[in-house]
Image: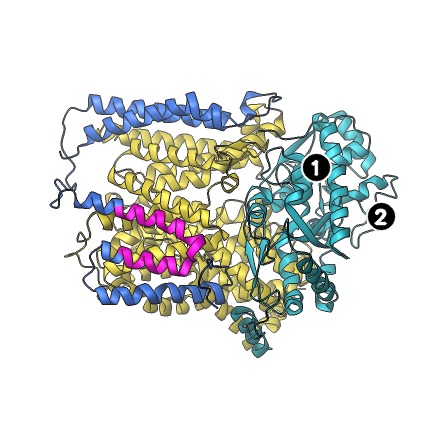
Chain colours: A cyan, B yellow, C blue
Amino acid sequence: MKLRTLGSVLALGVGLMAGAAMAEYPERPINMIIPYGAGGATDISARTIAEPLGTAVGKALVMANVTGAGGATGSVAVQNAKADGYTMLFARVGSHSVNPAMKATLPYTLDDFRFVTVYEINPVACAVRPDSGINSMDDLVAKVNEGGVSYSSSGVGSLLHLAGAMVLKEFGVADPLGQATHIPQQGGGAAATAVLNGTATFICTNSSALASFVANEQLKPLMVTTAEPVVGFDAPTANDLGKPSLNQLVGWTGIAGPDGLPDDVADKWGEWMAAATADEAFLTSMQQRGSVIELMDPAAANAFILEQYNTFKALVDELGMRIEG
Amino acid sequence: MSLLDSLSAGLALVGNVEAFLMLFIGLVVGVVAGAIPGLSATMAVALTLPFTFSMTPINAILLLLGVYKGGIFGGSIPAILIKTPGTPASSATILDGHPMAERGEAGRALGMALYASCTADAVSNLALILFAGWLASFALNFGPPEFFALILFSLTIIAGVSGESLLRGALSALAGLLLATIGLDLVYGTNRFTLGDPNMMGGLNFIAVLIGLFAIPEIIAMAWNPVAHLGRTRALGKSRCTLADYLGSFKSIIRGSMIGVFLGSIPGIGAAPSAFLSYSEARRTSKNKDNFGKGEIEGVAASEAGNNGVAGATLIPLLALGVPGDVITAIIIGAFMVHGLQPGPMMFILNVDIIYGLFIGLIVSSVFLLFVGSVAIRGFRFVADVPKRILMPGVLVLCIYGVFAVNNNIFDVGVMFVMGWVGYIMMRNRIPAAPFLIAFILGPLLEDNFRQSMLMSGSDPSILFRGPITWFFWLLTTITVFAITRSTLRKRVPLS
Amino acid sequence: MPMSQKSLHLRLGIAASLFALFLVLFAIPTFVFAPSNIGNIILSPKFWPYVLAGLTGIIGLSLLANAVTAAEDTPFEDEETVHPEGSAPWMRLGALAVIMVLVMFGLPRLGMVWTAMLAFAACAFLFRTRHPVAALVCAVIVPLLLYAFFAHVAGVAIPQGNFVRLP
């Protein structure tokens, strides 16, 4: 065990240099940019897939967190990189569908990237404090109509920000932004804490971020947005409540390169991802955290993201949530 | 299960060589990583995380905790030796640690840093074991209005680190507050002073500003006068931290540990403000008040106690509530989840063996740290003997690598250089750098919590006085401001 | 002329007051964006910058008042009076600034390791080291060691540049 650990330390540290130099892609380590901070959902997902993916690629994957501005700083770094397949991005729902839908001043658009895959879907759940007296979405909506309800998010332009508004809108609240107050926090951890300590009334975020609070009965789930129930969440699905359109509201992680990525590189990634996501250890550890592993090829990934983007864009325009300036 | 049963269950879990070996390796990795500027404790923990996936949960978490604690201490080594804090938490250590090294007392300063760190670490671990539940439920009472009052009080630290002139200290603090407004607005997401540059939208990187402000001005000063250091003793000599030194600073160490425990158990503050608060409290009550900032050993002791006191206490909200107090504990929570553990109240019932195993590991870690730290000090002391005109270019290169590594962004290297010149101009104009840094850390917290409070109450300012905690900090702030004003006037050096 | 508290505060006071004016009149209106539909002024993104600009102005005026009312004009004791080398120090400061600009230029093009080597050597000679050979040896070894550590132990993607790539 000790030796094995040490071995893996060395192997990961020195990099998988053993692979002989081949003329074809990849002939050197690939930089993988994670646009969010260490320990976050994107980071953990990226580092978990890095291991089976590195084996499939046969070259080292150099993971680099480039954080800031809700994922924009890291995304721009990839947008400006050479489209040679040696700089790739772990794209996330926040950086590549909510942000482009909400921010007029974002320095990039979806067209600046070529997605090679989406490999992970995260159901979204809404939760409140158990002692809040809110036991269902109907209770929540009734409370919103009384006034004084707020919801927390990890920042402006995050999935959480949009999710709160979208859920209320779907459940018939006429003006979600006016009737419920959005209280942004610095990061997802702080957003959940804000509900715990009573700063905000409810939160809608990835189920993995809420799993431990729900298991500890510190938070009470009201619904999940997927069609299938989520393990550990004793709450109705969106379809149970007759709101199947909320199925669009899910988190995801994918991999993208700059626009202009050659076709053979994209195809290579398709093969690698197929091999990597079949890895048993990867599957178990991802599912343990509440992710649904769903591999999409480049075409399917692009279609999926575009559809979500359009849904969000329509909602943003309808509610006047667009950020100018 | 009785306490004894829990203890023995925990002991059974950690009572093997492997668990202690992991803790030990973690501490070594942490101290080395902490001692390299830019490779802060946060990054060391993040880099270690993937290696823990294949371990048993207790080994994994002990390894990460070792890295964390080692990193926080390790940061003080370069802070003292080359005026470059290895981690943000050790920036307060520079204030007195580096002048001591300049005087040829690097060994004494490093020794004191180690002893204060270990003591604070032990106090912090004890607080975790004894009061975790109580402190955690207390911490949940901290909403935005309470934070606002606490941070407003913390800003009074600026008076303590302003040096010879309060006015120049305030000027420095304002510059820090203004610089911290760069980036995206929290509530509306609009641009503030970003000049359209995507790199600025995330705000200026804290480590880049920190290193730029402290390390680079030294290099620039060397260009101004390359022979200024000649004739001054710099070699380490035989200077050591004596028992008398330790006892003399003992009160400050304990006070610093308490401050660390308190601030650590509240999610969202972090170790750097704690170190500064501890430092300014030590200065306020010390007999050698005037010697602070010029190489007072008690200052080193207080800062290091303040930041290491946080290390154990951040585990309080983590274990008792499942809430991460800072970035590092956020990563450690990730490690818990990878192993299917869900930190929170239920963990004390479901996984009590792991909890007590951790407690035992933590107690041992303070002892290990003493050992690893004293070896590290011996290893790094040679730095003080390197000719300064070769050392400084080396520091420059190290800073370039380190600042880049923090966020993998070349832009940050540029921020560091620019801040270096700002720091140099401030140095030449006798404007202290410490208030700048504190304001840069606390400014965004102050503004964010103020606006969150206003959002909560619908812009009704009375929410800022909503409960006993806020009253307490408002009172404390008032008293402190009153005391500062009085002592400034009494000195009859008009506001200077 | 030796610097005294009076002259220093006069200088800082003028600078701070002017800077506050610059912020209020130009920088905040131009570079801070606020949505048009904000209900309350204290929630605006511009509120806090304006508060800070105001405080800067107050501190600036206090510094001026302090400088004007200070009676005695004693120079700081530990201030260097006249630099023995004339204009040479200014040249060196300028040279160091040029080195820094070149580093920023070289990092993405030459790669971090080669740039760092050149920067190390240039600085060592700028500081007129007494051990030129040792400095050159360090200039080569230190960046390489740091590269080996950061790239292969810490797994950081150190910029490699367009010319010579290191393993």
Instruction: Reply above or below: A317 against C116.
Output: above
| Quarter of the rendering occupied by the N terminus of chain B | bottom right
Residue B128 in the image: x percent, y percent? Answer: 54, 56
Q: Residue visible at 27% across and 34% down?
A: B165
Residue A14 appears in the figure: yes
Instruction: Point out which mark residue B356 bears.
Output: none
The image shows residue A141 at horizontal and vertical percentages of: 79, 32
The kind of residue tagged 1 is Leu
Dominant SS type (magenta): helix
- The answer to whether residue A13 is left or right of residue C95 is right
Q: Would you name the residue on which mark 1 appears?
A: A162
Subunit ID for the residue under disc 2:
A
Is B143 above or below relative to B224? above
Q: Secondary structure at mark 2?
A: loop
Residues at marks 2 and 1 on the same chain: yes
Q: How many marks?
A: 2
Left or right, B258 with reference to B106: right
Residue at 23% across / 49% down in the picture?
B223
Choose between B218 and B317: the one closer to the eye: B218
- Magenta residues (range): C95-123
Q: Indicate the amino acid at tag 2.
A: Ala
- Percent position of residue B259, x then y: 44, 47
Position in image of residue C13 (x %, y %) = 28, 26
Under circle 1, the secondary element is helix
Q: Any magenta on residue C96?
A: yes
Is residue B273 magenta-colored?
Answer: no
Q: Earlier in the sequence, mark 2 or mark 1?
A: 1
Q: The numbered mark 1 sits on a residue in which chain? A: A
Q: Residues within 10 Å of mark 1 (few under 14, many from 20)?
A: many
Taking A16 as reference, is B163 left or right?
left
Residue at the image position 45 percent from the left and 24 percent from the top: C50
The residue that disc 2 covers is A227
